[in-house]
Amino acid sequence: MASLLDDVTIPDERAAAGAGVAAATLERYLQTHPSGDGRIKLSGQRGADVEVSAEALRLLVEILGHLARGNAVTVAPLAAEITTQQAAELLNVSRPFVVKLLDDGQVPFRKVGNRRRMRLADVLAYRRRDDEHRDLVLRRLTEEAEALGLYE
């Protein structure tokens, strides 16, 4: 299985600029073509029309926005199963650290032979919980430092 981070292309300046123009164009389209039924009809050259959900179009605008800022974007289904190495790359930690998370029960997994597999959604949920915990600790430390008069 290829890594989630394999085949990632960082957009160059030209691609980023093009993505920015496309994002702005689609954003304007969404604002000027409200959809009561949640579907948007896009008209292209030579009568090439396509209908997409407004939510899918908003997601495309968000992806283009990331590309416009020079960020690479990967799209994967949340139900996808990933390896410990892929999870480590996604969380920016070592593979042994991920194994410890699994063994400690912090992320659900299943065994395939002697290999561990996790659902991408579970790894992302762990990352969200970890980010929230880190933010809480930082807020508490900041409040404590302010109470001690360290921010004057």
Image (spheres, helix red, strand yellow):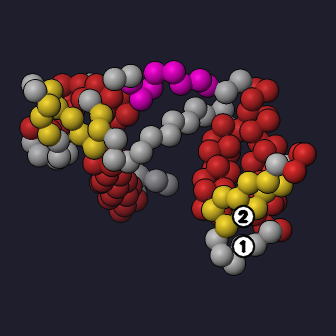
Q: Residue at x 82, y 43 (%)?
A: 21
Query: Looking at the image, which residue sits at the far bottom?
Result: 36
SS at circle 2? strand
- Element class at badge 1: loop
- Residue 80, x across and y down, in percent: 34, 41
Disc sitting over residue 35 in the figure: 1
Left or right of 5? Residue 141 is left
Is 9 a magenta residue? yes
The x and y percentages for residue 61 are 68, 51
Q: Main secondary structure of the magenta part?
A: loop
The location of residue 84, given as percent across then percent down, is: 24, 29
CB atoms at circles 1 and 2 under 8 Å apart? yes
Q: Is residue 54 left or right of residue 84?
A: right
Q: Which residue is mark 2?
A: 40
**Amino acid type, label 2:** Ile
Q: Is residue 34 above or below residue 105?
A: below
| Chain part drawn in magenta | 3-10
For this rendering, which residue is in front, 136 or 83? 83
